[in-house]
Image (cartoon, grey):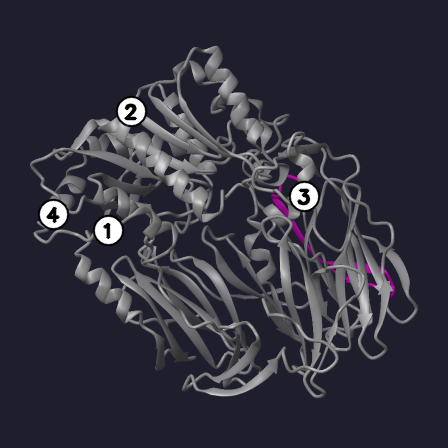
Amino acid sequence: MNKKLFGFICLIICAMTIQAQDISLNDIIEKKYAAKSVAVSNMMKDGSSYVAISEDGLSLLRYELKSGQLLDTIVNVEKTREHQMKHIEGFCFNEQENQILLWNNAKPVYRRSFYADYYVYNRRHNILEPLSENGAQRDVCFSPDGRMVAFARDNNLFIKKLDFKTEVAVTKDGAINQIINGTSDWLYEEEFSTTRMYEWTADSKYLIYVRFNESHVKEYALTEYYCSMPEKADYQYYPGEYRFKYPRAGQDNSRVSLHAYQVQYRQNTQLTLPLDKEDYIPYLKATKQANQMAIMTLNRNQNEFKLFYINPKSNINKLVLSESNEAYIDPTYLPEIEFTSKDFTYISEKDGYRHLYLYKTNGMLIKQITSGSNELLRYYGRDTLNNLFYYQAVDELPYHRAVFVSDAKGKQTRLSDKEKGVYSARFNPGMKVFIENYSSATQANRQSLKQAKGKTIRVMEDNAELQAKLTSMKLPQKEFFECQAADGQKLYGWMLRPQDFDQNKTYPLVMLQYSGPNSQEVLDEYSFDWEYFLSRQGYVVVAVDGRGTGSRGEAFRKQTYMKLGEMESADQAAVARQLGALPYIDENRMAIWGWSFGGYISLISLMQDEAVFKAAISIAPVCDWRYYNTAYTERFMRRPQENPDGYDAFSAFSRIDKFSGNLLLIHGLSDDNVHPNQSMEIIDALVRQGIQFDMQLYPNRNHSILGTIYREHLYRKCFEFLENKLR
């Protein structure tokens, strides 16, 4: 047992003498203890106001930032000319702020994409018109001059010319599961977090887009059932299916190509880039130059990044920046490249930590802007007049964050208040003020308007009512501690004890984790999830971020490269042993649970050389990385053809002979991400080994198993399993 851990935990034990208010699973699922915030959907270019949707969904209302007072109604859809909408679900201004895209009836496609009914609102004339009469649209975007709108439908791109009210087809060869123009395939949406794969040039003369040929990518079929889709009557006796293209590790991806559409002459041209057929084009970004687009590419192993400029008129490309890495380049931060007329910013971890760099437009390095072990986590933008760069970074410990500013000389200043916790920011277009959100494990979200130098203008929401309720409940607090990984490296975690904790008694332990690359479960921020329900029921609940997780630099993050599962599962077991040595934790009643990557770690935690956990809850688990998608898996493991031993070592199938303990396996049968056949395969393997286990399947539910009744059922099942196995 780590003496430092034991001593620290003993010091923070406190007796609770007041009985806690009961916390039900419905309270958790229905977000009874969720923090409120002021909805600021859009901050205006005037720098002093913002726009939000009214509570009844019928209007866009403009408020003054400094006072929060209502200034005026931008649009009321019951009073518009020509057409009306029943309600507003979302909106977007053009650059000139004289026209607005409004939409409703949004229907999801995958995790981020959706189709909706879009309308264009002319502020000057109070006219509302449908964007198109030919079906719902997706990935809609104004041109920079505000005179056109591009959108996608049925795998093709279109342009609506607002001056003439004409709709023009940019492409015509789009076909389901074959050709996609201007929107992402499933893989790009999931792993590069992008759905719109087109951009306007700064002069609005060209639309640059990516074309996906996925005709040779293998399909996966999800079964659809009548039970929760009664609108599909044909499914009642014969279930239907949904088929889509999903490239698994080592298999074929979509072939991508770059194209330019010249608006005036309605001409399409394929643009030339020095790419391998396996390369990715994850992001496009307009520069400040007319006839110039920035194109970002990654090789298939994602350890070589290249930034090109391309001129759609001449079809000439220029390599501006390239970077390689022994492991991989994290694509998450590539979209945060920001161009001015003279330079651009770029985020890299080439000094061992993720930091901001400034380059001339020709790709010559000017300066490293941020530095140190407190790595940058999010770049907010730049005040170009004063040459100041705003960002969020680690604040001393990896589970704390703060908002910072750096000048062009690299001098970094912390803008957040003295209280420790997690701070984030959202700046107005001129970078003169920002809305800061702060919370900690003991403080519900506080939303404040601040000057760019950090001075508070006003508190917009302090959640005082919720804070008073939480205080009156006398809940146990999350206690942050340090422990050791399997190899002795320092790890961080939090512990939540039962309400009426007695150090002379012993308690069952439940460990919550995700464990995936660059993830973090241990954050000093407000969150009220089912760990509070479990602690109320007499469980000690712990979360620890093992090796490979985020905010601790490149070396810590990438040590799991080529061997996913090995260190992550070893660390959870090592911490469980340390906790099991505490006098108030019963080492014979310890469980682990997780979802997705966390479900994978939970599953293989029952397949260790030495049994540690009595029970595991595994939700939507990856069982073997060969079953998962190319972009994610190969980023961390390379292709199975290159790394067969890494794939085999911690596959659940190769370790099933080590299985020991009690398993609850849960999966949604419409999971387009971690496919349900992964669970079906492990079920068959368990049966062949004569291993008994518990399971729960949810028809027509995706990876998140959403829906109040489904979530309540899921958590109830998990709780009953823990009660049966650990009591």
What is the magenta range?
299-319
For disc 2, the marked residue is: 614
For disc 3, the marked residue is: 299
Question: Which amino acid does the dot numbered 1 rest on?
Answer: Lys
* Cα–Cα gap, marks 4 and 2: 26 Å
State yes or no: discs 3 and 2 in contact (Cβ < 8 Å).
Answer: no
For disc 1, the marked residue is: 478
Residue 468 at x, y = what percent?
22, 66
* Cα–Cα gap, marks 1 and 2: 24 Å
Circle 1 or circle 3, nearest the eye: 1
For disc 4, the marked residue is: 13
Q: Residues within 10 Å of mark 4 (few under 14, many from 20)?
A: few
* Cα–Cα gap, marks 3 and 4: 52 Å
Q: Secondary structure at mark 3?
A: loop
Question: Which amino acid does the dot numbered 2 rest on?
Answer: Lys
Question: Which amino acid does the dot numbered 4 rest on?
Answer: Ile
Q: Quadrant of the N terminus?
A: top left
Residue 290 at x, y = what percent?
78, 73
Residue 478 at x, y = what percent?
24, 51
Left or right, 640 with respect to 693, comes to right
